[in-house]
Amino acid sequence: MFNTLDDLDPEQRVLVRLDLNSPVEDGEVQDNRRFDRHAETVAELADGGHRVVLMAHQGRPGDDDFVSLEQHADILSGHIGKDVKFVADTYGDEAIEAIESLDAGEVLLLENVRMCDDELPEEDPEVKAETEFVQTLAPHFDAYINDAYSAAHRSHASLVGFALELPAYAGRVMESEYQANSSIATREFDGQVTMVVGGTKATDVIDVMNNLGDKVDQFLLGGIAGELFLRAAGNEVGFDLEGMDFFDDQWEANRETIESLLDERGDQIKLAVDLAYEDETEDRGEIAVANITEKDRPYLDVGSMTVDEYDPIIRDSEAVFVKGALGLFEDERFAVGTVGVLEAISETDCFSVVGGGDTSRAIEMYGMDEDDFGHVSIAGGAYIRALTGAPLAGVEVLKQD
Ligand code: 3PG
Ligand code: MG
């Protein structure tokens, strides 16, 4: 399939692409699971006596979270228990000097690759390989390692260009993410396969249903996407209240598709039977969907009756995939749906993959043990693409015939 670190010759000069893209609050980069995961690959390379140069991105030009990677170097260093040097340059003289002065076992992080003009426009790997960025850096290395599965859906220079110029390998994160996230498309399961689908984007849910409708026995819906399906099923929910901008545009764009999915796959699709809201005393209130005659407040979670219906379906499953949250789990009052399904998974001896945006964050927020899940993905957009069987540019260039 692809070469891994097991295939790497000793004492190489390696150029490694990580995905350290992280939330930034008031200018401060927030530690998260991505550092922890990539630390494994980096530590293995450093301990193996390689000269390790890291590339990563943060934010997008013009956005508040488009910042230097200086803080990322410190955070990563904490995770691997070893100094991570940083140079505020991507491929200029300063960067080359820092690269050339590395000793065996040392680690250096280059500046945010999106600060370099050649990185961003999405173009074919062959075009990216010819950029000045790739052509300048590649000759200083023996091997290119891509560990950034969660960014691999982007055809950017650091993700697709170097693989054409240097012997290319998959890092440990790339390997495990690829295997777990492709398993729904590649593995056969004897028993029931269930997919929990929530989050904010209707098109993600639609894509997953269109592509996996024959593999998945039950789709359990929630979140904003779930409310749109409830609207299509004839309920008085799933539209914007004043000042809201979640539902109506998505409804216009996807109404027909959602209606025909309900028509064709209705017996595979489970919708919430009750919803939760913030009541007059700021507590959690719940209402049966059947009793909603007029949407007069936002719904922020699925209700407990819904969790009671979803729970036994999960416990009867051989495999469960989670894409997106069922409610606003960051607020404890509205975490019942998301935590309910995650707890059912963690208590069941099934194969499971949890991913999609920040959903996996609920696992540590609510004290669950990551080891009780098959795989907790650090990918968002790449995870959705993998679930729907779409190729990832950065993975394709690593593949060996
Ligand atoms: C992510 O954080 O989802 C990946 O790093 C990709 O980032 P991007 O959506 O800005 O390309
Ligand atoms: Mg994420």
Image (cartoon, rainbow, N blue to C red):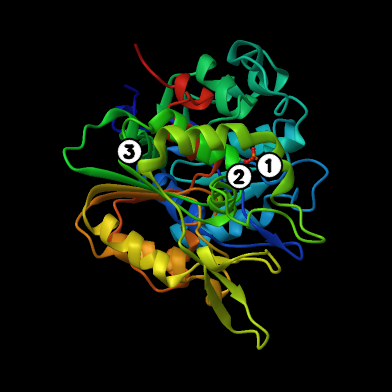
Asked if the residue under mark 1 is in contact with the one under mark 3, i.e. CB atoms within 8 Å, the reply is no
Other-residue count near label 2 (Cα within 10 Å), few / some / many at <14 / 14–19 / ≥20: some
Dot 3 amino acid type: Val
The image quadrant that residue 267 belongs to is top left
Asked if the residue under mark 1 is in contact with the one under mark 2, i.e. CB atoms within 8 Å, the reply is yes
Residue 290 vs residue 60, the one in the foreground = 290
Dividing the image into 4 quarters, which one contains the N terminus?
A: top left
At 67% from the left and 46% from the top, the residue drawn is 58
Residue under circle 3?
Answer: 216
Residue under circle 2?
Answer: 201
- Lower position in the chain sequence, tag 3 or tag 1: 3
At 68% from the left and 42% from the top, the residue drawn is 250
Tell me the element at label 3.
Answer: loop
Vertical position of residue 358 compared to residue 136: above or below: below
Residue under circle 1?
Answer: 250
Residue 180 in the image, given as x and y percentages of width and height: 33, 40
The Cα atoms of the two marked residues, 2 and 3, are separated by: 19 Å
The Cα atoms of the two marked residues, 2 and 1, are separated by: 8 Å
Is residue 276 visible in the rendered image? The answer is yes
The mark found on residue 24 in the picture is none
- Lower position in the chain sequence, tag 2 or tag 3: 2
Tell me the element at label 2.
Answer: loop
Vertical position of residue 227 compared to residue 396: above or below: below
Q: Nearer the viewer, mark 2 or mark 1?
A: 1
Residue 375 in the image, given as x and y percentages of width and height: 34, 50
At 41% from the left and 64% from the top, the residue drawn is 306
Residue 81 vs residue 66, the one in the foreground = 66
Dot 2 amino acid type: Lys
Dot 1 amino acid type: Gln
* The image quadrant in which ligand 1 is located: top right
Dividing the image into 4 quarters, which one contains the C terminus?
A: top left
